[in-house]
Amino acid sequence: MQYRPDIDGIRAVAVVPVVMFHAGIWPFTGGFVGVDVFFVISGYLITSILVGDIQAGNFSIARFYERRIRRIFPALFLMLGLSFIAGWFILLPSYFEDFSEGVFATALFLSNFQFWRESGYFDSAADLKPLLHTWSLAVEEQFYIFFPLLLALFYRHRLSILKAALLVVTVISFALSVYFVRSAPEAAFYLTPMRVWELMAGCLLAVGMVPRFTSNRVAEVSAAVGIALIAIAVFGFTPATPFPGVAALLPVVGTMLLIHSGESSVTTIGRILSTPVLVGIGLISYSLYLFHWPVFVFYRHLVDGGDGELGMRILLIFLSVALAWASWRYVERPFRRRAPTSTKRRVFAVGGVVAVTFLAVGGVGNAMKGWPARYDFRFDPAPVMKAGEREIRKVMEGVRCRVPGEGSTANAHRHCDEMPLRHPAVALIGDSHASHIYPGLIAEFPDVDFRLYGAGGCRVLRNVNTRESKPDCAIVGPFFYDTVLPGQKFDGVILSGRWEMADVEPLAESIEYISRYADDVVVLGPVPRYKVNLPEALAIWKGEYSRKFFDLNEDATVAGIDDALAARLAGSGATYISLYRGLCRDRKCRLFGEGGKSPLQWDKAHLTVAGSHFVASELLVPVLREHPAFAQPPMSTLDNRHMQDVER
């Protein structure tokens, strides 16, 4: 295939927005679409090379994968090695444990599955994962497992069938992307079947599915439209844009137009793309993509979890470029040139050894729980975190009335409605932040018949969470609001959740609906949230450093959410109890329960059982005792069956 400098220029158009977006540089709010540009380029170039091999009669699967190893492995494993070294000195054990799992998954080119699986409720923030960006490499390599075989099978003698097959696969993949971007957005983003169509877009160009432009004017207009479509996506999209799906058509079609117009003639846009600066950026684009993200992430771990001031972010960009240039100059380029003594067998052997080495490194790091011995901990935080999670889960196993996530409202009905209400009866609804308050409530109010309706990651608000990927989310809300609430007579309803700003209005609307059926409605505000697991933070807490540490690492957005909820719910008829204000003053939050030994939280946001008891006794009891549903009769009147539940 003849070298086209304009394609290196398009690579620059892809990587620059990605880097700027990750650096938080305005106005690159949709810079993430650069990955989609890369997909189209990759599909076009790989297919063009394969077609050339087939036409020349020297197509070989072994040769194809040898080239992939030379192209992908050296810079990738250099990045993994340097990241492992940096992580060893920077990452706390829980993060290093997850990072090690990421190294393992990346070495297998399965990291897209890992990050899709980890995109759940208890997972650490995406912007603190050093290897998150490797999901796109995994998608490409998974695609190239089957594609060369399909191409070789049909191209020589059945080109028309090949084009039809590629078109069908493209349409099916695009349809899946459109469907899942609404019903399961994480799957649509990370998983290969919903991304294949973007690679296929380049493949279709390479096999001649689109006729060449015969007019220079048409090529000029097409190139201008192509760059405009990409620009609209880069500067017009935001992380809130449903993506990929239909929105991805802009960068994908835009890239197709740029590639195809340059194939037909030399356009003005093509000349600009072929300038030395853009070509130079394009040449280092792979290494720049690999190195920029870990640079940003490790910086966040070193400071406050944020991206720093603009000057610092620009400095990090220059550092990323420097690393990328060095990687391209001394690693990428030398390894791509085949030495006379470098046979296919040697390339596969060396590549295999390196991959297995990183599999072992990642596996051991994960098995060792992030090597906590690296830190001079005041105590080992891992048992504290595991014990806190285990205690909460054990309590939940004893709850007889909650939506268990078995996939149907019938099952939920079986678990909840077999037991008649015993008054006073209170419905506790919400996500895992309703579950973690349950132990404290049943201990402080043993005569109240609490019914927990909730599922992890699903804020139980009316007409919210009905189309989410988790089956529980689609079950619990409609079941509670449409079946349980109208059919039962609760003395009170408590709503608790990991509230965000987007929940303020839906919460107010839900309260209005609940008030038709229950006179006493209580909303529990959010608890403090941290950017690291609280026990880990406490384990390295030394002297005056503690003040600075918690100033930097306590999530200040919770205070704003708490204020917004308090203001919006004033006058709604519901009682709002601010847990955040009860635990924090001037961003200095209470960390331990009574006695100063047991942390209130076992991860970044969830209460331990001891924390649940402390919050209930110190913050909830003084307010709820004034409510009729929680005014306890003498202990002699307590229901024995319910007492057994409490003891359990």
Image: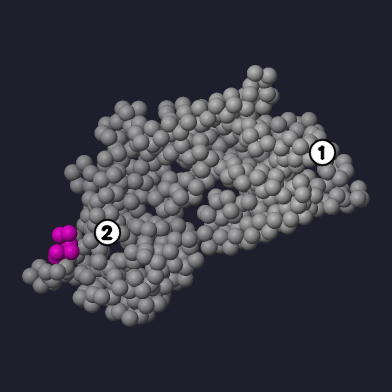
Residue 174 badge: none
Q: Quadrant of residue 350?
A: top right
Residue visible at 10% across and 68% down in the picture: 635
94 in magenta: no
Residue visible at 29% across and 31% down in the picture: 377
Give percent across and percent down for residue 436.
Answer: 30, 56
Q: Give the vertical position of 571 relative to 606 (above or below).
A: below
In the displayed structure image, the side of residue 136 where residue 620 appears, left or right: left
Query: Can you identify the residue that label 1 sits on?
Result: 272
Q: How is the image coloured?
A: one colour
Q: Quadrant of residue 447?
A: bottom left
Q: Relative to the observer, which residue lies in front, 448 or 260?
A: 260
Query: Can you identify the residue that label 2 sits on?
Result: 396
Q: CA distance from mark 2 to mark 1?
A: 62 Å
- Crowd rating for badge 1 (residues with CA inside 10 Å; few <14, some 14–19, many 20+): some
| Placement of the C terminus among the 4 image quadrants | bottom left
Q: Earlier in the sequence, mark 2 or mark 1?
A: 1
Q: Relative to the observer, which residue lies in front, 612 or 359?
A: 359
Residue visible at 51% across and 31% down in the picture: 355
Residue 132 appears in the rendering:
no
Residue farthest toward the front in the current orientation of the protein:
157
Q: Give the vertical position of 84 relative to 158 (above or below).
A: above
Give SS at disc 2. Answer: helix
User: Mark 1 belongs to which amino acid?
Assistant: Ile
